[in-house]
Image: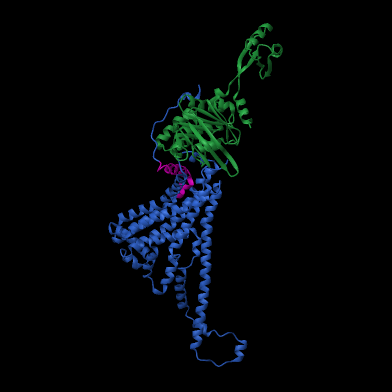
């Protein structure tokens, strides 16, 4: 188990940041989704033992977050959302300092800092002062500082905020590689659904401090029986009319995609037959799955 | 080629224990501080008084041995500190060493304030400004580790200014004296220097950290520190000076009045001459009999007594620190012994000029303790982990 929370409530004055939250998450790459103010950051701080909760209990990597905060933080690497880099130090010094704060010896920390900076692609810029880094480089430096002590769990809080597409893709690649190839568990907090979908296997959706949905992304994006996505060589309008005549319902989607719902008891054979009869060439046909966006919106809109 | 193809290796080294985790913050702070050219220059200049102290102690050691090397300096020393002392250097060894250290530490206190001005303002304010607190508190560090680490930076630099030169000068003085009894006579000085360094470091260190936590802008913190240093000194000095002048004036007027009354009482009654009394100048004969010298000596004595309960210098931060330090060094006792070499009628003035504030030293200790308590409260209030909404 990566972490579990049981009835955790955290309030800041009149604001309830976490509302009787109970959730258990297995090891692996976990996406933490939710709109702004949903309690994602508070949940991360709770997991790190940085804030006392009003009530509830829980554990991270099997360690009670009430009593073993320092042990948890030793096993966890955290890259905060805020830009926490102070000027006047070179990138390699910053990463080494992050290691020393965890308890690495000075020499080990410096050696390891060089390694992780190479890994995140900052090898050439390691001696540049951090204030001269671009936003993408700063994010990668934060990532390097978080993994410098080789944690079991890496927590990334909004790691792609404010980044250009190329930089964003690089950070996502790194996160994916760490989570899937290097055996590091990952909590990836973001409100960008494609980012979470690109990196994570598991997702926790929060809203107003409560758990709205949780599970494997593959399971949440369930099949819709009797629904198919179809793309043809030509435009879909005439084909849609033909399918309607056969008792199907159709809906046009972006990119000439046609969403077809066959009558109860029917199968995709109806679509093939219609195409054959109309001499249409089907380029793409697959059963419809919910997108993560649909899962998220459905969860958030749920009363 | 994806950048991660350069490979990620797992790390299997051991982490150190938690007890010395704060040292990483201190080391980093010292490294950053030493990059400041102004600070390096200030440290270099701060060592000049230590060179003078070491030279003086060596000269005194050679003087005790009646070395020919220092004979050319004897006339100069006699004019500075009196022939009686120079002719018998061993008898005044403790006093001379004590007062040499007293002057040295007083000078170094000013350099300490300057060094703190260069090192301290950014210690916490920079972390607040650049949102660096999550960097610390998301790692296995407690708030006390953070504060200790930051305080350690101040302690290191003040140690370089106050303690290290004191110890080096002491060792040099000991070596040049070739007399182990010096160790017996003056070892308490060494302890006093270390204690003094600790008091300045903890008190001033916590104060600058508290000030640093009050603003995200290091320049404002620097201005706060200058206010603590200069304004508090000015207020303390001005209040004490005004009070002293007022007291002296009252004492003088009272003494003159008493002298005149006594003179009038001693004179036989004179026949009254109305014409002269009505239009002529006042009679000044009794005033001419006032013994100003005696009055002045009485005033000096009373001033010394009054200084023992004058609380006004407590307004000055540096006076409080130096008052504690001088007490530990035993500077007042040394001045009193040296005062025995000056004429009795000049002794009070001599002591008044040299001894500085005379109120009980623990008043200053209490003021410093209160400041330390306030600083801790401010730090506790301002640096509150991450238990807040963004």
Colour of chain A as rendered: green
Give how far across and how far down residue A62 sits, in percent: 45, 34
In the visual, does A54 lie left or right of A108? right
Residue A261 appears left or right of B191: right
> Could you say where residue B257 lies in the image, as x and y percent from the top left?
52, 81
The region drawn magenta spans: B18-42
Image quadrant holding the C terminus of chain B, namely top right
On the question of residue B86 being in view, the answer is yes
Prevailing SS of the magenta stretch: helix
- Residue at position x 51%, y 63% from top? B237
What percent of the width, then of the height, locates residue A12? 57, 43
Q: Name above or below for residue A254 compared with residue B187.
A: above
Do we see residue A134 in this rendering? no
Chain identifier, blue in the render: B
Image position of B189 (left or right of B317): left
- The residue depicted at 68 percent of the width and 18 percent of the height is A252
Give the percent coordinates (x, y) of residue B370.
Answer: 48, 57
- Viewer-proximal residue among B214 and B298: B214
- Is B271 magenta? The answer is no
Q: Does B21 appear in magenta? A: yes
Q: Is residue A179 above or below residue B157?
A: above
Task: Name the side, left or right, on which A303 lies relative to B257.
Answer: right
């Amino acid at each position: 188990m990566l972490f579990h929370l049981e009835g955790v409530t955290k309030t800041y004055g009149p604001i309830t940041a976490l509302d009787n939250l109970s959730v258990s998450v297995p090891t692996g790459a976990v996406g933490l989704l939710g709109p702004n103010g949903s309690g994602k950051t508070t949940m991360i701080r709770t997991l790190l033992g940085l804030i006392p909760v009003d009530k509830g209990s829980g554990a991270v990597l099997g360690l009670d977050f009430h009593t073993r905060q320092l042990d948890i933080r030793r096993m966890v690497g955290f890259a905060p959302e805020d830009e926490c880099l102070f000027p006047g130090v070179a990138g390699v010094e910053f990463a080494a300092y992050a290691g020393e704060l965890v308890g690495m010896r000075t020499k080990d920390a410096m050696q390891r800092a060089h390694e992780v900076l190479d890994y995140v692609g900052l090898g050439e810029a390691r001696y540049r002062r951090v204030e001269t880094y671009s936003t993408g480089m700063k994010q990668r430096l934060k990532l390097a500082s978080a993994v410098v002590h080789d944690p079991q769990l890496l927590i990334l809080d909004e790691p792609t905020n404010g980044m250009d597409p190329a930089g964003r893709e690089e950070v996502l690649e790194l996160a994916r590689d760490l989570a899937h190839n290097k055996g590091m568990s990952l909590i990836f907090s973001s409100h960008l659904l494609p980012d979470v979908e690109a990196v994570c296997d598991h997702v926790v959706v929060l809203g107003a401090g409560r758990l709205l949905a949780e599970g494997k992304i593959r399971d949440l994006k369930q099949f819709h029986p009797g629904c198919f996505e179809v793309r043809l060589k030509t435009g879909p309008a005439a084909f849609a009319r033909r399918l309607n005549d056969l008792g199907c319902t159709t809906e046009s989607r972006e990119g000439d995609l046609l969403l077809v719902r066959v009558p109860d008891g029917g199968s995709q054979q109806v679509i093939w037959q219609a195409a054959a009869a109309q001499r249409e060439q089907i380029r793409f046909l697959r059963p419809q799955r919910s997108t993560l966006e649909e899962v998220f919106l459905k969860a958030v809109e749920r009363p | 080629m994806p950048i991660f193809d350069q490979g990620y290796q797992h790390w299997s080294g051991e982490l150190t224990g938690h007890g010395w985790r704060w040292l990483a913050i201190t080391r980093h702070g010292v490294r950053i501080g030493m990059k400041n050219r102004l600070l390096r220059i200030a440290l270099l200049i701060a060592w000049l008084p230590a060179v003078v102290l070491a030279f003086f102690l060596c000269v005194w050691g050679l003087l005790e041995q009646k070395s020919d090397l220092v004979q050319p300096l004897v006339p100069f020393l006699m004019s500075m500190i009196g022939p009686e002392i120079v002719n018998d250097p061993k008898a005044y060894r403790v006093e001379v060493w004590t007062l040499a250290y007293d002057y040295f530490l007083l000078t170094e206190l000013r350099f300490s304030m300057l060094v703190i001005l260069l090192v301290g303002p950014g210690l916490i304010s920079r972390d607040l400004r650049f949102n660096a607190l999550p960097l610390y508190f998301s790692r296995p560090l407690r708030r006390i580790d953070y504060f200790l680490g930051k305080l350690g930076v101040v302690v290191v630099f003040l140690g370089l200014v106050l303690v290290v030169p004191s110890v080096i000068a002491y060792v040099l003085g000991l070596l040049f004296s070739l007399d182990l009894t010096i160790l017996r006579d003056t070892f308490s000085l060494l302890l006093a220097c270390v204690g003094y360094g600790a008091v300045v470091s903890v008190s001033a260190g916590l104060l600058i950290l508290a000030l640093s936590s009050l603003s995200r802008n290091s320049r404002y913190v620097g201005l706060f520190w200058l206010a603590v240093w200069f304004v508090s000194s000015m207020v303390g000095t001005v209040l004490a000076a005004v009070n002293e002048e007022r007291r002296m004036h009252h004492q003088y007027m009272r003494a003159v009045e008493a002298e005149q009354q006594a003179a009038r009482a001693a004179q036989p009654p004179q026949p009254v001459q109305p014409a002269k009394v009505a239009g002529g100048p006042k009679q000044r004969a009794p005033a001419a009999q006032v013994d100003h010298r005696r009055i002045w000596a009485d005033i000096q004595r009373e001033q010394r007594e009054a200084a023992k309960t004058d609380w006004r210098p407590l307004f000055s931060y540096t006076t409080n620190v130096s008052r504690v330090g001088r007490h530990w060094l035993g500077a007042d006792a040394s001045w009193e012994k040296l005062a025995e070499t000056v004429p009795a009628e000049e002794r009070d003035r001599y002591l008044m000029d040299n001894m500085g504030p005379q109120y009980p030293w623990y008043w200053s200790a209490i003021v410093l303790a209160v400041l330390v308590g306030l600083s801790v409260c401010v730090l506790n209030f301002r640096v509150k982990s991450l238990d807040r909404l963004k």
